Image (cartoon, rainbow, N blue to C red):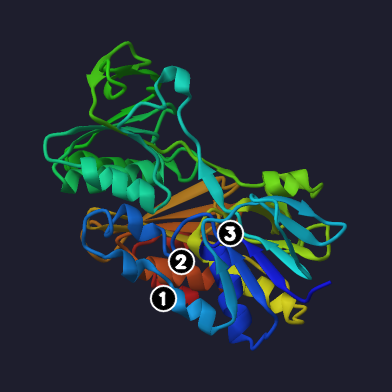
Amino acid sequence: MTDRIVIVGAGQGGFAVAAKLRALKDERPITLIGAEAFAPYQRPPLSKKYLLGEMSFDRLQFRPESWFAENGIDLKLQHFVESIDRKNKQVVMQDGKTLGYDKLVLATGATPRRLPRDIGGDLKGVFVMRDKRDADGLAAVMKPGKKLLVVGGGYVGLEAAAVARKFDVDVTVIEMADRILKRVAAAETAKVMRAIHESHGVEIRENTGLNRLIDNGSGEVCGAELSDGSTVGVDIVVVGIGVQPNDQLAKDAGLSVGNGISVDQFGRTEDADIFAVGDCVELPFKGEVIRLESVPNATDQGDAVAGVLTGSDKPYEPSPWFWSDQYDVKLQIAGYNGGYDTVITRAGMREGSVSVWYFKGEELLAVDAINDARAYVCAKKMLAAGINPTKEEIANPQTDLKMLAS
C-alpha cells in the first residue's frame, strides 16, 4: 500500500487540488497525470487573448514546470489512465503499468461534442474550442475575408464569433433553438447579446440547424447546407454544441454516474477513497443535483477536496459565478438560474449597461450583468448572504443596490 495521492487530470480542477494540498502543508507524495504535453494552464484565454496573439502561452501556465518537481509533485504529461483497480487501489496506465494510491482524485474534465462524420464533421477546417491545439489550429486559419460558420449559439460559439470579427472574418452563427443562449440564459439576456453581435456584423440565424458540410473534393470544408434549405460558403467551422463529462473511467470502475461522476457535498464518490472535481462531476446544490461547467467551480471544489483530504469536515457549498468576454462587452453571471419563473431587467448607471435578475417565487436565484459591474458585485453579495430583494425594488431604477446588498 502507499500513502500517495493520485490526481487524474491536469486541468483547472486537478491543479487546484495539488496546489492546495501543498499550500495546506500536506507532505504526502502526489502524482498529477495529464493527457496533454503541457504543464497545467488556464483555458479561458485560449479562445480570446491567446488566439488573438495578445497573450503568450507561458503566461497561461499556472506554474512553470519546474515548480511541480520543487514541490514534490510527480507531473506525468502525455499519460492516460485506462482503468481503476479499486480492489488493489491502483490505476492502470495506457502502457499497462500500474500506480498505487491511497486517495484518488478524478479531475477528468469534459470533451466538446463534435459533428458526426456522416455530415462532414471530420473535414479539414472544422474545429472545436477546448485546448491549446484547438486554439493554435484556429489561429492558423483566421484570416481577413475568410468565412466562418459557428454551429451553436451558446457562450463558446458567441465568443468564437466575437474573436473572428476582430480578425475581420465574415461570421454566420446558426442555432437550432428559437434563440441563442436558450439553455443558459433568459430571452432578455439573449436579446441584448444578439444585438451586440449584429452591431459587429455577425449574422445570426435562429431556428436553423445544419444538414451537412460540403467537401471541396480534397477533404476540406467549402460550404454548408442548412436546415432552412439554404447553402452558405464556408472556409472555417467552429462547433459549439456543448460538452460531455469525461466520466467513463469512473463508470467502468463501477462508480455512480449520472450527468457526470456523482459526488457528495465533500466531493467524495461512493468509494470513500475516490474523489472527483470540476466539469466531470454532478454535485448537490440546494436540493438538486447539477453539473457546473466553470473555472471558478473547478477551482473552488478542488480547494475544498484538498481540505477534506487533509482532515477538514467542511462541505463544499457552490457559489456559482461565470463570465464571458465578447468584443468590449463583459458578461458576468452570479448564481444559478435553474428553475426561474420571473425575470426583471434593470438598466445600469452607465450607457449600455444592463442586468437581468432571475427569481423563483420571491427567491433571488441569479443575475446576468452586461457591462454592469456594480449590479454583479451587489448581486453576488446578496446571493452569498441569502438576501432576497423584492422584484419591485429591483425594477425600480432609483433603488440603491449597494444598500440592498448591505
Determine the residue located farthest toward the bottom in the rendered image.
25
Residue at mark 3? 9
Determine which quarter of the picture holds residue 322.
bottom left
- Pointer 2 with pointer 1, Cβ within 8 A: yes
Residue 266, position as x, y percentages in the image: 74, 68
Q: Residue at x 81, y 62 (%)?
A: 89
Specify which label sits upstream in the sequence, 3 or 2.
3
From the viewer's perspective, is 78 left or right of 349? Answer: right
Residue at mark 1? 64
From the viewer's perspective, is 82 left or right of 57? Answer: right
| Mark 2 crowd level (few <14, some 14–19, many ≥20, 10 Å Cα) | many
Residue 290, position as x, y percentages in the image: 65, 51
* Disc 1 from disc 3: Cα separation: 17 Å
Residue 190, position as x, y percentages in the image: 37, 42
| Mark 1 crowd level (few <14, some 14–19, many ≥20, 10 Å Cα) | few
Residue at mark 2? 39
